[in-house]
Amino acid sequence: MAQAVRFYETGGPEVLCWEDVEVGEPGPGEVRVRHEAVGLNFADTYFRSGLYPAALPAGMGVEAAGVIDAVGPGVEGFEAGDRVTYTGSPLGAYSTERVMPAEHLLALPDGIGFDTAASMTMRGLTTAYLLRRIHPLREGDTVLLHAAAGGVGSIFVQWAKLLGVNVIGTVSSEEKAEIARANGCDHVVIYTREDVTARVREITGGAGVPVVYDSIGKTTFATSLDSLSRRGLLVCFGTASGPTPPIDAMQLAVKGSLFVTRPALADYIADPAERAELAGELFSHVAAGRIRIEINQRYQLSDAMRAHSDMESGRGVGSSVFTV
């Protein structure tokens, strides 16, 4: 029998339950996927805590990689035995197998392992839209990236260097600073002991940066705005420390006619052609070794409660994955 992590109420990691589930056969437009590895993302905690709405009871997780073992009527482009990866709704990736819409799947190249795919499909596609869709970055531009040693941060820094973009990265410790530097981060600021805005101004000759990429939210919002150059753009793509504060539009004018956006991955992969283009670029970099995916934490699916506790405490670095 298949097994899955589910939750019946919102709250802390303790609400996660490991239980047997009936999977059944795929219906029209669906496939059944046998998971080999499952992604662990900070966004998973938003559903569990209630920050993101979910109809209860609910499964957990939006990212996994595995093999199709059954195909429902009307599915085109996939067949039993295909290696696939995916990220996105519906919830339920924390499972040994599941039935899901085929439209969410991406064919997984043979040169990319299941563990690698499950730990980077969401983070990699997030990086892809941040660097390739949000702002027209030019070679030689300098940007500020918070959480530069995290799962997205580690991919972002490597990809930015391929584009000739300089990165100022913030981290919480010297250990994480070493990871960011190893990935090519040009300037690393340890925010627990340095003034981030002052360092950004120093590095940029007082001008600030044209773009700040902020996945932290509440605690970094003011610093991010203050680090921007005139007419700069703040990209708020996560809320690890809590929701972003309300925006005072007049302050955007006072601080230099600034722009703020709060994008979501779902809106950048909703179009199949755009999703395929972003995934193709990501997969080609990873398969060729131009972007390395370091998996720093591995858990069993039944250890989801501990995995969420570790993630929310900040004990992890880089990417994490569940093995199945």
Image (tube, rainbow, N blue to C red):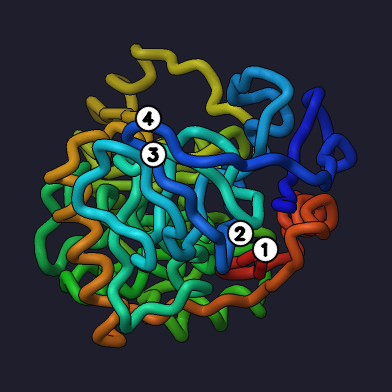
**Residue 154 percent across, percent down from the top left:** 45, 70
* Residue shown at 36% from the left, 50% from the top: 126
Q: Is residue 164 left or right of residue 64?
A: left
Q: Mark 1 points at which residue?
A: 193
Q: Residues within 10 Å of mark 2 (few under 14, many from 20)?
A: some
- Residue 270 visible in the picture: yes
Q: Which of marks 1 and 3 is nearer the N terminus?
A: 3
Disc number lying in front (2 or 3): 3
Ranked by sequence position, the earlier of labels 2 and 3 is 3
> Which is in the foreground here, disc 4 or disc 2?
4
Q: Name the residue under label 2.
A: 191
Distance, label 4 to label 1, CA atoms, is 28 Å
Q: In which quarter of the image is residue 5?
A: top right
Q: Distance between the residues labelled 4 and 2?
A: 23 Å
Q: Name which of mark 4 and mark 2 comes first in the sequence.
A: 2
Tell me the residue that label 4 is attached to.
262
Pointer 4 local density, CA inside 10 Å: few below 14, some 14–19, many at least 20: few
Across and down, in percent, residue 128 comes to 27, 56
Mark closest to the chain's N terminus, 3 or 4: 3
| Crowdedness near tag 3: few (<14), some (14–19) or many (≥20) residues, C-alpha within 10 Å | many
Question: Hey, which quadrant is residue 219 in on the image?
Answer: top right
Residue 30: which disc? 3
Q: Which residue is drawn at 46% across and 50% down?
A: 197
Q: Nearer the viewer, residue 75 or 54?
A: 75
**Rounded to the nearest whole Å, what is the CA distance between mark 1 and mark 2?**
5 Å
Who is closer to the viewer here, 241 or 202?
A: 241
Q: In the drawing, does residue 205 fall left or right of residue 137? A: right
